[in-house]
Image: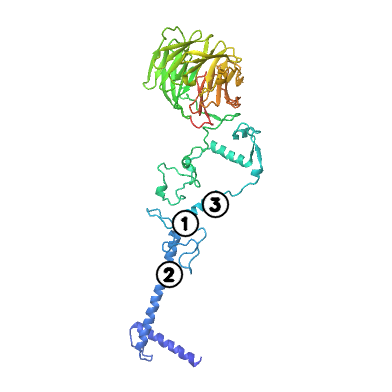
Amino acid sequence: MSLISQNAVLKQQRDKKLDREIADGSPIAHADEEVEPVDELKLKKSKKRRSDSDDSSKQKARKTEQEEMKRLEGFLFGNLYTPIEFDKETYGDDSGQEQVATDAPLFFMDRSTNSEMVVYENDLCTMGKEELSEERKPVWVDEEEERTEVDIARINRLRKLRKEADEHVISGADYVARLRAQHAKLNPGTEWANVDRRYARCGISEDDSDDESGLTIARGFDDAEGDDILRGSDELVIKGGTKLLPGLLEYSRLVDANAEEPSNGPINSVQFHRNGQLLLTAGLDRRLRFFQVDGKCNPKIQSIFMEDCPVHKASFLPDGKEVIIAGRRKFFYSFDLVKASVTKIGPLTGREEKSLEVFEVSPDSSTIAFIGNEGYILLVSSRTKELIGTLKMNGSARSLAFADGGHQLLSSGGDGHVYHWDLRTRKCIHKAVDEGSISGYALCASPDSSLFAAGSSSGIANVYKREEFLGGKRKPLKTIENLTTMVDHIKFNPDAQILAISSRMKKNGLKLVHIPSFNVFSNYPPPRFSMQYPRCLDFSPGGGFMTVGNAGGKVLLYKLHHYQNA
């Protein structure tokens, strides 16, 4: 070992010895060691150096601890100390901090208080719109759809996709769109499947975004026109004003309208109230029953027993306040729905009729027309229930129908003619032969009085345009020959797109005819279901329900899917 290195080692040993003595606070050295004089300046420098070292180590430890706390808080709660720059992907300073993953959230919105983060409002709005626009773009587009053509008239199950009766070939894209619309119609949306949009709307807090109704709008439809349509689970395709297509009728059978209390005899009358929910049924068991039609339970509301009158016909007055009940008797009944009272009326003054079972009520609720003896038609005031006039046909009268808002009356009977009467003058304004008819048994006019249909004893039903018939044209628009027995009931639905004809003399003797193509719907009645002998039928005011009363005492209820309202 060299001399220089030995001196360096001795100097280090003396410094260590001096430090220990100073730390012990004793200036006395051991007996076997040489005592050296203590330099006061060296002591001061040593103390200062040691204190500076301790302070710097403590500051470093404190700084490291604070940085670690900030880093952890940044991961848990976001950066709370410095504003975030969306172009940077680091927390804190640029040196020595951990990189943030590309999918980590760039902000955190504390919704525990009412405070709002106004600083980032524009940025959030921009990001939300970009995200929504990106999500609404299709991932993949099939180029073959534009070049493909589909013949929807050739395949039976695709005919329901037609918008016009003579439509045949459509493009592939249009075919896909119609399939989606058909799926949406058959499978309406549900509330639990709606996506909450409260955080997607820009500049609106959570409290402001909640409606009183509690409904939300699906994501991506915030700016759509007709915002209220999307606030519920209703069907988006409104079918009220669309045309009904021929071929197959979309319908489903529901619980029988009188399932809670079936009749003990044949059903002779069924009719909906003007509100579309109340249904009356009447038959030979002498009971008049009222049901609330909902398609599920159809609860019975009231039942009235007519002790001395098997009911052949019962009908609401169009104003909905009263029911006229008649049978094979020389009197009839009036049931007041408001007062819940039954009034017996008749016999009519000056008349000797023993049966008033066939009658019709005018659309303006002013007149009740009864069929009398020997071709007479009896006009009775619905207000006073008194006879106000009579009309006389050449042959026997068997069917009646009002037209022109109650100002005209149509009648037919045993001579095979159709009469038009003006009730203001009480004169016959037109009389013509119903083509192919030997004896007329049924008449009905469309709601707008533009068409009328006549059924005969031979099973033939003719449909006429009323203006042309009054002008002298005797040829019907269509002769329907699908029934082979007497047609005793004819009814137009509320928008005159369906004509129902029935015969009580044959099982399943009911046909539904499409207007204006005059083709019979091939899938009704269902081939594997027997409705027995139909005796009466009616459509609800909105066209959504159809009821059929049969000889077995049941009232069958059907839902017509083309119509949205009952």
Say whether residue 527 is visible: no
Residue to which mark 2 is pinned: 64
Q: Check the image and tell me how it is coloured.
A: rainbow
Q: Nearer the viewer, residue 149 or 376?
A: 376
**Which residue does the image show at 38% across and 55% down from the upper left?**
115
The residue wearing badge 3 is 134
Is residue 155 found left or right of 209 in the rendered image? right
Q: Nearer the viewer, residue 359 or 109?
A: 359
Given residues 414 and 332, the one toward you in this image is: 414
Q: For marks 2 and 3, give the one nearer the viewer.
A: 3
x, y percentage for residue 213?
A: 41, 41
Q: Nearer the viewer, residue 18 or 228?
A: 228
- Evaluate if marks 2 and 3 touch, with contact meaning CB atoms under 8 Å apart: no
Furthest-bottom residue in this view: 3
Q: Residues within 10 Å of mark 1 (few under 14, many from 20)?
A: few
Whether residue 22 appears in this view of the structure is: yes
- The kind of residue tagged 3 is Glu
Q: Does dot 3 land on a helix, a strand or a loop?
A: helix
Residue appearing at x 47%, y 62% in the figure? 85
Query: Disc 3 versus disc 1: distance between alpha carbons?
Result: 16 Å
The numbered mark, 1 or 2, whose residue comes first in the sequence reads: 2
SS state under label 1:
helix
Name the front one of labels 1 and 2: 1
Neighbours of disc 2 within 10 Å: few (<14), some (14-19), many (20+) = few
Three-letter amino acid code at the position of disc 2: Thr
Q: Position of residue 283 (x, y in %)?
A: 47, 17
Three-letter amino acid code at the position of disc 1 = Asp
Q: Position of residue 233 (x, y in %)?
A: 48, 39
Q: Earlier in the sequence, mark 3 or mark 1?
A: 1
Label 3–label 1 contact, CB within 8 A: no
Residue at numbered disc 1:
123
